[in-house]
Image (tube, rainbow, N blue to C red):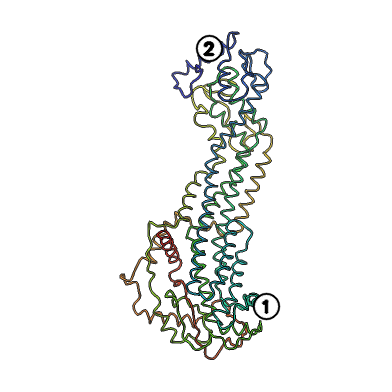
Amino acid sequence: MSRGICPRVNSCGSFWILSAVIFAANVIDTDAYSCHEVRTAFQLRQVGPLHRVPETPGTDVDLLVCKHPGPSCCTRKMEESYQLAVKRETLHNIQSYSYELEHLISGHSDAFQDMFQYLLSFSQGHLSSLLEGTYSSLSRHALPHVNQLFSSLSLYLRGANVSMEVSVHQFFNNLFPLVYTRLINPGIDGSMMMGSEMGDCLRMIRQDVNPFGPHPAIMAQELAGALGAGKQLGLALEEGLEVMNATENVSMSKECVKGLVKMVYCSHCRGLTLIKPCVGYCLNVMRGCLASVSELDQPWRRYTSLLEQLTHAMAGHHSLELALLGVREHVNEALLYAQLHGPLITATVDKVCGLSTGEPTSMQPTSPEVTTSTMTSSSLPPSAAPSSQPLPEQWLGQLAHLRSPFPLKPSKNNKPSLRTLSREFLMYLQRYKSFFAALPEMLCEGENVVDDSMCWSGDEVVESYTGRVVGNGLHAQRQNPAVKVRSPNPTLAEVKERLERFNQETQERFPKLGQMEAWDELGSGETEESSTTDCDDEDGCQASGDGQDQTSHTEASSEGKPIGRQPGGDSPHENPSKPPPVKVIGGSASASWARPWSLALLFAALCLQWTLF
């Protein structure tokens, strides 16, 4: 097949190209001209049945789109085939450009959900190990409630209509009867109480008695904050996929299809099967056809900005990992709080539920029993004892020596997987902020068009396109010389409205998203980690006079105001003249001065241990 016009030639060859075009135009006027090249292109591009293409050009053809004076190799049936073909080809080109973006969204949506489920499983195992190792007396009956809690967290992160606050409080409601009968008053027959009215009474009054102090509320607040951003990110990615699906299968107006046929195939009717459209002409056609798609540009830019902010909120400071890993610490501190306030809790329960237990076992004059070496003096909240009396001196001597520097150092090469995944996602997302505005330009680049020399203007072959090139959007198409846009696409108008509504709801739900610092402003976070934990015993990080210093710290805490509401309310035991020693099982997972980086380092160490074994 001979080439009539070759793309991208230098200006010196323009004369010969123009001569060839004139020669082809002269040849088509003769009866001896053949439509062989048109038939070949029609067959190669799978436009339609080959019998629709005439062997020789006709002189009295009544065409609707590709009208021009003189003989033509096109027929009405061919125009119909061209319309179907150009719609198919244009949609294919749109899908080829949007495929990577759709794959980015869907792939990271699955990857984030997999990471969420892994972190949930890890955190659940972390809490179960605490109960089995430190609180073995209640672990067997508590583990089903642990499973229920993390099942609710999993559903929440998957977008289910689950209340984080209700799930956390339900967990502690179910935990209270076990704690009451197996830790505070181990002499009570817990098996008889669990399914009785007394067990129901304990669950009902748990929030009023407040046996776990402020820890359930703090735990619910932290989970709702970090997991809320993760849940909203998952919903946002699903919304993005809906937008992409709608634009990939966009319907094209009759005016758009006519414009595409005129741009791509009308030159074939004159035997010019190799000539390509001018860039400016192509932009006018594509911007006219995709005018409603381009209207998605502004809400899409806002949407991608929200994706960035949600990702920062979820993973910028290891927020989601720390919130999930902190579940163990909150439960441990809640159980410790309940044991320390056993007498007050027992008196209130006996008063409200009518449970007569006599003198609780926890009120026997025994010294505190610590079964884990991780308990620290700072883990005792100011409300851990009645506010009118400090802790007994014999307690302070046993607790003071337990504070020690955190033994782990941060690994600068071992960054949390969620943060790495989030950085990768944001890096790719940057390319697609202006996707819908740039789509017409992407369709009018490469080998599909000619930006210099001879090109097709829709009516004839020209040296350059002299028509006005309009911008994006519906408003700009009023001046479009290539495609008439009469009204917006109703499907895409609905997609735009839904995306704007989603953006608004997200902003209302997370009003502080725009106030968060971006990662490029925070750096890698290694400085903060190093300043907190980059020391060991050899560096002299452990303060001199540990026992004395920490004893003073504990005394100051015990004399401060209580954290939260004291359990028992108006219990007659609320202000005893002499606080009895309380047997304490378990302890805080880490000192308050080690959070949050100690949790992140502990998470990394445990992940490494899982990998090795």
Q: In the picture, residue 148 is in which quadrant?
A: bottom right
Mark toward the start of the polypeptide (1 vs 2): 2
The structure residue drawn at horizontal position 55% and vertical position 20%, both measured from the top left corner, is 273
Looking at the rendered structure, the secondary structure element under dot 2 is: helix
- Give the vertical position of 432 relative to 611 (above or below): above
- Number of the front mark, 1 or 2: 1
The structure residue drawn at horizontal position 57% and vertical position 59%, both measured from the top left corner, is 154
* Residue on which the image places disc 1: 197
- The residue sitting at the left extreme is 538
Q: In the picture, residue 459 is in which quadrant?
A: top right
The amino acid at mark 1 is: Glu
x, y percentage for residue 14?
47, 18
Q: Name the quadrant of the C terminus.
A: bottom left
Give the numbered dot on residue 23. Answer: 2
Spatial CA distance of label 1 from label 2 is: 101 Å
x, y percentage for residue 324?
51, 64
The structure residue drawn at horizontal position 64% and vertical position 45%, both measured from the top left corner, is 496
x, y percentage for residue 133?
47, 72
Q: In the picture, residue 548 is in which quadrant?
A: bottom left
x, y percentage for residue 227?
55, 60
Q: Residue 23 or 190: which is nearer the viewer?
A: 190
Q: Are marks 1 and 2 in contact (CB under 8 Å)?
A: no
Q: Neighbour class for label 2 at 10 Å: few (<14), some, many (≥20)?
A: few
